Structures are given as C-alpha cells and as structure tokens.
C-alpha cells in the first residue's frame, strides 16, 4: 500500500462487502476483505449439494430503476436468466385453495359470489381516517383493505413470519399501500427481473474474481472476534484464528456484521433482536413438483412449519439435473423456540411429511435432505425498538471510520436492489464523487441580531420563561381532524405554539435518487420517502382551515416551509414566524426568502458545522432581520442520549449572541429537562395523540399528558434554579430555630463555676451561642446558674 492510497477494511464478504470492495478498488483504493466462512456471498452464496446448486433462499434480482437494470445487464448479462415469476397463497384445511398473489381485480372477480361481494363492499369506501388512527398492524390493514382481505392475507402470514400477533405489531410493519393490479400478473410486474443462471452466488463469485484482479485481498476463514479501540478510533481488528490486523485512524471500515455484534465489540450490549430462518432442502427423484408456471407457494397455516416453498429448478434449469429436483422450505425461528432448537434430522423428517400433507410430493420419493440456519435475517421491530436502535447506532457511529450497511448492519431488511444502491451511494461519498464545494462572498451585515425576540407577545431570551412549541409536524397522518385534535392537545397542555409543516413532495425530495431507491416497492411492503411525503402533505385548503382553527382556539400556529412557494403560501395565511428545518440550513435561498418577511426565524442546526451555521445566520442578518433563534438539534429519529451534546447550546449562544433553544428528538423528557435547567430559551418537541400510531415521528413524540409535564417543567425549573444568591430561605427559619446547633449546659452549672469542655455541650435547637464561640467561652465563669440542658447565652457568662 502506498502512503497516499486510501485503505478500506471490509468485514464480511456478502453482497455489501463484495460490491463495496469492487467499487472502491476501481477508484484506486487499497482494499482487504475478511469473511468468517470459507466462501464468499453471505446470504447470497451458492454451493454444490450433491447433484444440485443451492442458495440460502430464492433470490430474485429485480428493480424498477432503469440505471441499475442497465448496470446489471452490462456487468453480468451472461450470468442472468430472465423470465416471469409466479406464486400463489395456499389456504384451506386441505391446502387446495390457491389464491393469486399479488392481489388483482381479475383474481377477485373469480372469487365465490358472496366472498367477492363482501370484499368489494369493504373496498368501496377507503378508510383513510382509520389508517391515520391505527395503533396496530391489524387496525391499519383493516382500514387499508377491509376485514375480509385482511383476514385472508394479512393475519396469519405476518404472525408466522414475525412470531407475534398482529395486535402486538405496530402499524409501521404494515404495507404502506396495496396495489390492486388489473390482471393476474407475474410477481415482479413492470420491473426488470432475473435470477442467477447458476444460482445467486455466481454473480458474487464473478465480483470476487474482479476484486482479486484489481489487487484486492479476500481473507476467508477470518471471523471477527473483537475490535481494538483508542478514543474514538479503531486501532485493530482481532480474529478467531488468533491473527490481528492494525488499523490507522484514516482507514475506512465497512461492516455488514449484525449491528448487535458490532456494537458489542465496541462495548455496548444491544437489546435489538433478529428473526432467523432455517431453510430445509429436500431432494426428490422427480422431474418437477410445483404446478406448471408456479415458482413458489406461501403458506400461512400454523399447522405447517414452513411459510414459503420454492422449487429452484423452475427458476433456472441449470440448478438441477434432469429427472431430479429439490425444494427449499423456509421456516422462521427465534432463539429458544421449538424450531430453532430442533435437531436437523427431525426438522427434515417433519418438513418432508408436511410437504406430502399439503399435496406437493410424497415423502418416500425424497432422496436427501439438508438444513441451513441463518440467525440474522429479519430485524424484529418490536414495539419501542426505535429507542434501542438509536442507542445501538450511537454506540457504532461514535467511531466515524465505521460504515455499517446491509440488513444486519442497518437493522433494516434490504433486498439486492437496495443493497446495490446503498453501496453505490456510500462509495460515492467515500471517493468524493458526491461532494460539492462552494464559496460564499462575505458581505457587511445590515443589522445586529437581537438577544431577545418577541413571539406572539412573549419575550424569548435570557431571564425569560422557556417558550414551548408542540411540533405536530407530520403526526396528523394526513387527517385534518387529527391535526385539529393536535392543536387542541397543545392548547390544553399549555404550549405557547403549535407547528406543522408546509411542502410539496416534489420540491422536498427527489423521486429518483438515494433513499427513494432504498424501499421495497414491488408489492407495497414499503413506501419511498417521496410517497410518504406525498401522502402526508397538507393541502392549502386544509392548512387555511387549520390556521383559522388554531387562532380561534387561542394558540399561536406556524409552520416549517420546505420551499420558496411554501413561504409565500404561509405569508398568505399570516404566519407570525418561521422555522427552518436542519436539512434546509444550507438552503440559503429559502432562509433568505423567509428572513425577508421580517418575521422571527427559528433555525434548527442539526447535521451542521459552525461554519454552515454562520452562513445561515449571516443570510438572515443580511436580509435585515435581527429576530433569530438558534435551535441545537440532533437530527436522528429518535436521537440517542449520548449524542445530544447539550453543551453546544452554550457554544451557539457565545458565538452568535442570540436566544438558543433545543429541538428535541429523543424519547422521553429527560433531555428537555436538562436543557431547560441549562438555560434553553425555547424547547420544541414532537406532539402525538398516541405514540403507537403509524408514522415516522410518533415513537419519539410526547403524548398530551407528557407535554403538560414539559410545560410544567418550564415553570418549575426557573423557580428551582433561583437567582444564584446564597441566603437563608424564608421556609428554613423554622427548621433553623428547631435544629441548628448551639452551646448548651451539659449539666447544672452553678454561678461562679468555670465553663469547661466537660460542662458544655453542642446540640439543638438554636437559641444559645453558636458553636464557633466554644473556645471563647471555655475558661470564663458563669454569671448565674445555668440549668442542665439549657442554652448558654452571652448574658450567662
């Protein structure tokens, strides 16, 4: 390695590790990959099992993105086998009811008359309000597709996959939308799709070859066992084979290890959990098993262990010889459950028997069986997991050399298209292809910022009570009725203001790049950020109604604009102030437009440096607006406590001489309370009617009762802090007179007797000479008799 060549150490030779290594090598980096297994590919590897080529599960390369499709075709065209892939849901006591999936109007039209009429009746009027108010997966899906389709497709199957009931699952687990196709179509309809001709692993073996050709190094059989840290740097990696590799502070470490394991090596024991999969391979001396043109079946019956059966030979004939085939049966499990602990031979026997039971193949025709167990497949998003995820990510992100990617590394299920996109974007950042550099010409400011700012008749700044903003944001879930209830809740809690967001999805985020490509969209399992913002954007008419409602309720209402048109729209509503979100701190044209209104500006400073904050502040001042409040912020959702860095509030106050507050994205009130105690002039927190509702911000929000506690804190904390002058408080005088120590006669002291340490005592209550005068009193004579246990005064000596 040359001194000026950047170096990457990659932990794991799965798709994340291999694609990262390949692309970094192409950019001239020095790269070394470490993999615990003896082969590469991770969950996407292919290996030989007797006469067959097998994968850990059926992996389909698919994407709606034309650029990624062209890339795959160009780089690996000869390794792919393109085609249409079909599946069905199998239900019924005798497992003979085959339902088309994904859903389509054509398939519904074939349902029995009574069933079809019930479904159509339930779908006739979409329950938008029901989705907005849903507190569980079950409630969300009932509102989304009606009770009948929910029961058919969205009850037993998700419970089987995740191991918990749909009542316990939060609405965030639910598919964002359900696509009802016009016709019965292949699973990956209107997308480029293909399989690896000789298994998924053939593509990653090709990437391995390219890595070696470019001078990269791949160490197989090197299992990571520990990391040596110094401060916030990784200084070494320890392996199970007894070897170690040193790491320099400027080295980049890309990890696809489960984030729980990675955090553990960095000193944090994460409580996050994964759901695993045991894949059972069953070989048969049959030409084929599944019905014609069917590639896999889904099973939701609790009587059957497996949730999916695939016949890989039907995906690619190159995976099995003629007159032989095999099935892969996928069974989810968790540590400690019956499946997880079952002996492999018994699991094979039971699975073969159940394959026969569902009518696919007789167990006597099975010629071999095998089992592969993967522990970290599905991140288990139990209720409240977000807080633990924030803590875990914080434990890892303290070490800025580390990039934790992939399903295990990010605790977010990702298929191959998402993994390729994320790796491409990460490599672009590391190699500088995603950076831009601008220069700003300094100009003389037109005014000086105010140390105190007036908001709706309230003075904000040092010496004033903390101003409380209820950030309703997107927590209305697209419902005007819920938005009004949030206004009411903010008013009842005693908040000074309630805030929403004003934007158009098209101007807030791109439809094409980065996070938009990270969602699985084929059957609506996830929605892209663009789709989410489009769903939650409040119409101009609803915003006007909402502003009028809040004003009639007697609470200040304002909004965060995300584009220039939104500033103009809010001006037409008579907004009294503006909040600029952290993501727009670098959007100087937006800041300038808002500042030129002359209204007070609240500027969030998450994800920014002092230099970037300075540019934004100068933009406001140059616009002639002295009314600026800076909000310290950590823009993670939710933010981890150890990353809040509340001392930065004082840094902002000293640097810019403006009121400073906190935009709090943590769970609970602890951080807000500390901020108030440290002199925050303003606190902004998310408000929700219920933290279990579906949506990105509910989990880190405060419910109305908790918000009322926050408002009460702003009143109590200043009283507790006081003015700093140390004095006896009025309430202390009774205690002082009852318990403060003074000099007493330890026994009867007669007139003329000399006072000594033996005949004097120190006790309460007060009333005698203070103990400080003991040495002055000793040796003097009593002027009069002092009864035992009575205080000694100056008149007594």
Image (cartoon, helix red, strand yellow):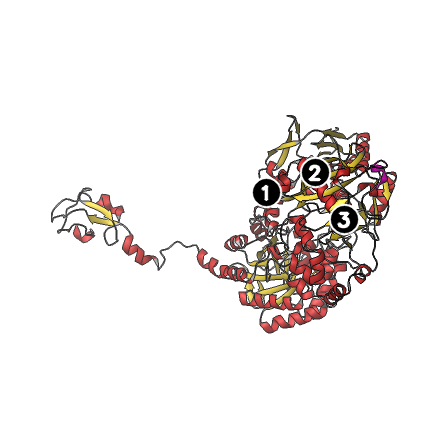
Which structural element holds mark 2?
A: helix
Which structural element holds mark 1?
A: loop
- How far across and how far down the image is residue 474, in percent? 66, 61
In this rendered view, identify the residue nearer to me: 285 or 646. Answer: 285
Q: Residue at x 55, y 54 (%)?
A: 668
* Residue that carries the numbered disc 1 in the rendered image: 270
Q: Earlier in the sequence, mark 3 or mark 1?
A: 1
Span of residues in magenta: 316-321
As drawn, which residue projects farthest toward the bottom?
552
In this rendered view, identify the residue nearer to me: 496 or 658. Answer: 496
In this rendering, which labeled residue sits more in front, label 1 or label 2? 2
* Residue that carries the numbered disc 3 in the rendered image: 297
As drawn, which residue projects farthest toward the top?
242
**On the rendered image, what quadrant is the N terminus found in?**
top right
Q: Quadrant of residue 50?
A: top right
Identify the disc placed on residue 99. none
Residues under labels 1 and 2: Cα distance? 33 Å
Which structural element holds mark 3?
A: strand
Q: Earlier in the sequence, mark 2 or mark 3?
A: 3
Q: Earlier in the sequence, mark 1 or mark 2?
A: 1
* Residue that carries the numbered disc 2 in the rendered image: 348
């Amino acid at each position: 390695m040359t001194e000026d060549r950047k170096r990457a150490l990659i932990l794991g030779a799965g798709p994340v590790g291999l694609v990262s290594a390949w692309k970094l090598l192409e950019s001239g980096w020095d790269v070394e990959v470490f993999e615990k297994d003896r082969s590469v590919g991770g969950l996407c590897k292919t290996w030989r099992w007797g006469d067959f080529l097998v994968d850990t599960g059926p992996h389909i390369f698919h994407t709606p993105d034309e650029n990624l499709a062209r890339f795959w075709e160009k780089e690996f065209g000869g390794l792919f086998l393109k085609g249409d892939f079909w599946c069905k849901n199998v239900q019924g006591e005798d497992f003979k009811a085959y339902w088309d999936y994904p859903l389509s109007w054509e398939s519904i039209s074939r349902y029995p008359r009574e069933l079809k009429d019930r479904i159509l009746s339930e779908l006739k009027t979409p329950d938008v309000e029901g989705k907005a108010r849903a507190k569980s997966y079950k409630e969300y899906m009932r509102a989304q597709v009606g009770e009948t389709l929910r029961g058919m497709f969205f009850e037993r199957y998700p419970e089987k996959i995740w191991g918990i009931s749909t009542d316990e699952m939060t609405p965030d687990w639910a598919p964002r939308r359900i696509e009802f196709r016009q016709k019965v179509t292949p699973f990956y309809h209107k997308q480029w799709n293909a399989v690896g001709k000789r298994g998924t692993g053939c593509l990653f073996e090709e990437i391995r070859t390219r890595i070696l050709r470019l001078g990269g190094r791949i160490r197989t059989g090197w299992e990571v066992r520990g990391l040596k840290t110094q401060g916030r740097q990784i200084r070494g990696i320890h392996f199970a084979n007894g070897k170690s590799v040193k790491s320099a502070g400027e080295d980049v470490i890309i990890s696809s290890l489960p984030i729980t394991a990675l955090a553990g090596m960095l000193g944090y024991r994460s409580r996050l959990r994964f759901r695993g999969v045991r894949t059972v391979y069953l070989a048969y001396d049959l030409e084929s098993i599944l019905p014609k043109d069917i590639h896999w079946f889904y099973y939701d019956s609790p009587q059957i262990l497996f949730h999916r059966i695939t016949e890989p030979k039907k995906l690619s004939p190159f995976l099995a010889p003629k007159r032989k085939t095999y099935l892969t049966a996928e069974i989810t499990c968790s540590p400690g459950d019956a499946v997880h602990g079952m002996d492999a031979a018994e699991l094979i026997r039971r699975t073969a028997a159940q394959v026969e039971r569902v009518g696919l193949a007789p167990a006597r025709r099975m010629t071999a069986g095998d089992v592969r167990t993967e522990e970290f497949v599905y991140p288990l998003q139990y209720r409240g997991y977000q807080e633990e995820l924030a803590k875990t990510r914080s434990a890892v992100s303290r070490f800025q050399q580390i990039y934790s990617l992939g399903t295990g590394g990010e605790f977010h299920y990702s298929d191959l298209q998402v993994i390729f996109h994320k790796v491409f974007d990460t490599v672009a950042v590391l190699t500088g292809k995603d950076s831009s550099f601008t220069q700003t010409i300094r100009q003389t400011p037109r005014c000086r910022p105010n140390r105190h700012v007036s908001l709706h008749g309230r003075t904000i700044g040092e010496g004033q009570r903390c101003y409380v903003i209820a950030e309703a944001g997107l927590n209305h879930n697209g419902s005007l009725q819920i938005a009004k209830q949030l206004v009411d809740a903010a008013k009842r809690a005693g908040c000074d203001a309630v805030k929403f967001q004003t934007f158009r999805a098209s101007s807030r985020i791109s439809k094409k790049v980065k996070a938009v490509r990270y969602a699985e969209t084929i059957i609506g399992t996830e929605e892209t950020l663009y789709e989410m913002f489009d769903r939650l954007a409040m119409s101009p008419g609803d915003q006007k109604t909402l502003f009028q409602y809040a004003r009639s309720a007697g609470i200040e209402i304002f909004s965060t604009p995300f584009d220039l048109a939104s500033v103009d729209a809010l001006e037409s509503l008579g907004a009294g102030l503006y909040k600029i979100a952290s993501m727009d701190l670098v959007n100087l044209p937006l800041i300038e437009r808002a500042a030129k209104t002359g209204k007070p500006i609240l500027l969030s400073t998450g994800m920014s440096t002092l230099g970037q904050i300075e540019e934004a502040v100068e933009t406001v001042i140059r616009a002639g607006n002295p009314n600026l409040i800076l909000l310290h912020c950590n823009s993670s959702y939710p933010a981890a406590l150890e990353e809040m860095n509340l001392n930065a509030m004082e840094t902002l106050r000293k640097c810019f001489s403006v009121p400073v507050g906190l935009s709090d994205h943590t769970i609970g009130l602890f951080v807000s309370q500390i901020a108030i105690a440290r002199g925050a002039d303003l606190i902004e927190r998310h408000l929700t009617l219920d933290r279990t509702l579906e949506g990105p911000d509910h989990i880190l929000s405060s419910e109305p009762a908790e918000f009322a506690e926050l408002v009460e804190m702003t009143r109590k904390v200043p009283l507790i802090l006081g003015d700093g002058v140390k004095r006896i408080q009025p309430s202390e005088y009774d205690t002082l007179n009852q318990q403060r120590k003074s000099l007493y006669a330890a026994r009867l002291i007669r007139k003329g007797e000399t006072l000594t340490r033996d005949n004097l005592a120190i006790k309460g209550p007060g009333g005698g000479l203070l103990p400080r005068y003991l040495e002055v009193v000793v040796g003097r004579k009593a002027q009069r008799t002092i009864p035992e246990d009575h205080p000694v005064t100056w008149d007594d000596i």
